Image: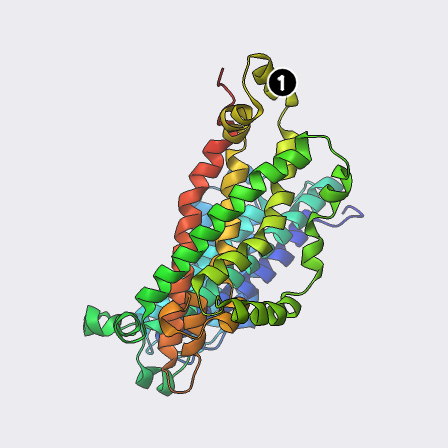
């Protein structure tokens, strides 16, 4: 045995951990979906993971065929069932039988696959220190990805499921996130329908879209020439300006909101969308300047000098050469600014009193009341999240395509 430990025993340890973690996770998922009081069988899951890891990693990597993995999965199922007293999810199999079998099989498949990925390429007799480090890093990476996925997906899952429930079901069993699809579309999406028909959410969406798009346009209009000047031109105080762009973020927004409230009230702009269109760019232009100036510095100056030598003015050089090459940065900044304006709450809460002018975040705050059903608040959160998510997924292809934009232009 090597002084750094035996690979086989290390795989058994990680198999035990994967079995316990994934059994617990799938049991909780079954609880959320069915509403039944399932209880994770952690000890049984750990034992099943230990034995399945022994079956899978006890042979050389070349012999870990699909049949061996199927055998390890069957062993996991068998051990989990027997060790838990035929209650793999903490309840008799007569309770929610199809669901229990489904989630138990999913736990077995996930555990065996996790063990396979952790020990891939390493057999029981490969005892170098490098192999030990690789296996440990694989486990940490897999566990980290799993934890990150749960942290991101679980709130959204709960939010969507609660938005599709009615008040009676939420009060009777708050942990039951199962959906009855037989009730019809009108009953299933009742919360969303009422938000648009009774709570003016269509107006809130339009207001948020208008303010966010205007903020992006104003921010880019000032940030692009400003960032280019800081990155390319030479003038007194250039270095100081470049380093002090983000100083505005040292001042908390709560400190600025009171004087801005007084000024906007005197100017008659407090209860208007125009006020938000002035305030939001003031908070986003500095970060846009900071992001864009770094990207402009990364563009070879020889390309711009060649354009100037060909007779192009500085403005045409920016439009025809610099901006096409900076498309990824422009798309990233536009998306980031849009998200800031879309989700901003403090200024919208302080400046807007007219319901017809509420932005989406301001309107959702009105739903956080004992007089409004909780599923309406969850539906409002879904409505606020989905457009930004869809916009990001749509923008992603432009971020990738923009990496080579302008690189072959003459």
Count of numbered circles on the image: 1
Quarter where residue 292 is shown: top right
> Residue at the location (42% across, 61% down)?
385
> Residue at the location (39% across, 56% down)?
209
Quarter where residue 160 is shown: bottom left
Quarter where residue 165 is shown: bottom left
Please tell me which residue lies in front, 102 or 290. 290
**Residue 30's spot in the image, x, y percent?**
40, 70
Please indicate whether residue 93 sits to the left or right of residue 88 in the image.
left
Residue 47 appearing in the image: no
- Label 1 element class: helix
**Residue 174's spot in the image, x, y percent?**
41, 81
**Residue 86's spot in the image, x, y percent?**
42, 74
Q: Residue furthest right?
A: 3
Q: Is residue 287 above or below residue 324?
A: below
Q: Residue furthest top?
A: 310
Please tell me which residue lies in front, 67 or 254. 254
**Residue 128's spot in the image, x, y percent?**
74, 40
Q: Give the colouring mode of the picture.
A: rainbow
Residue 267 appearing in the image: yes
Q: Is residue 250 above or below residue 402?
A: below
> Residue at the location (30% across, 72% down)?
179
Crowding around mark 1 (Cα neighbors within 10 Å: few <14, some 14 to 19, many 20+) is few
Please indicate whether residue 89 sits to the left or right of residue 17 in the image.
left
> Residue at the location (62% across, 69% down)?
259
The residue labelled by disc 1 is: 305
Please tell me which residue lies in front, 1 or 261. 261
Please tell me which residue lies in front, 166 or 323. 323
């Amino acid at each position: 045995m090597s002084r750094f430990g035996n690979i086989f025993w290390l795989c058994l340890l990680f198999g035990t951990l994967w079995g316990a973690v994934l059994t617990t996770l799938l049991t909780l998922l079954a609880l959320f979906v069915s509403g039944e009081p399932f209880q994770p069988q952690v000890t049984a899951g750990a034992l099943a993971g230990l034995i399945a890891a022994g079956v899978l990693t006890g042979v050389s990597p070349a012999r870990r065929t699909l049949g061996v993995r199927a055998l390890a999965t069957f062993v996991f199922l068998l051990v989990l069932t027997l060790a838990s007293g035929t209650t793999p999810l903490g309840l008799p199999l007569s309770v929610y039988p199809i669901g229990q079998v489904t989630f138990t099989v999913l736990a077995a498949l996930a555990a065996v696959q996790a063990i396979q990925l952790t020990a891939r390429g390493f057999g029981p007799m490969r005892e170098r220190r490098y192999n030990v480090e690789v296996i440990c890093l694989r486990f940490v990476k897999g566990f980290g990805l799993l934890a990150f996925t749960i942290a991101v997906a679980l709130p959204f899952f709960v939010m969507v499921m609660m938005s599709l429930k009615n008040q009676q079901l939420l009060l009777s069993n708050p942990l039951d996130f199962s959906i009855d699809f037989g009730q019809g579309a009108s009953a299933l999406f009742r919360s969303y329908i009422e938000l648009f028909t009774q709570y003016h959410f269509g107006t809130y969406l339009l207001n948020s879209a208008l303010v966010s798009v205007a903020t992006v346009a104003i921010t880019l209009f000032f940030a692009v020439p400003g960032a280019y000047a800081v990155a390319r031109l030479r003038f007194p105080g250039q270095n100081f300006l470049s380093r002090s762009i983000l100083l505005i973020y040292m001042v908390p927004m709560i400190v600025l909101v009171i004087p801005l409230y007084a000024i906007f009230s005197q100017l008659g702009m407090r209860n208007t969308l125009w006020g938000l269109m002035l305030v939001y760019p003031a908070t986003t232009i500095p970060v846009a300047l900071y992001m864009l100036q770094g990207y402009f510095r990364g563009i070879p100056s020889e390309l711009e000098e060649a354009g100037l030598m060909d007779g192009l003015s500085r403005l045409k050089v920016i439009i025809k050469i610099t901006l096409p090459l900076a498309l990824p940065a422009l798309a990233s900044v536009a998306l980031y600014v849009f998200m800031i304006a879309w989700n901003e709450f403090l200024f919208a809460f302080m400046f807007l009193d007219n319901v017809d002018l509420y932005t989406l975040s301001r309107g959702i705050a009105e739903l956080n009341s004992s007089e409004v059903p909780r599923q309406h608040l969850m539906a409002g959160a879904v409505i606020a999240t989905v457009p930004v998510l869809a916009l990001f997924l749509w923008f992603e292809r432009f971020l990738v395509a923009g990496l080579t934009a302008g690189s072959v232009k003459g």
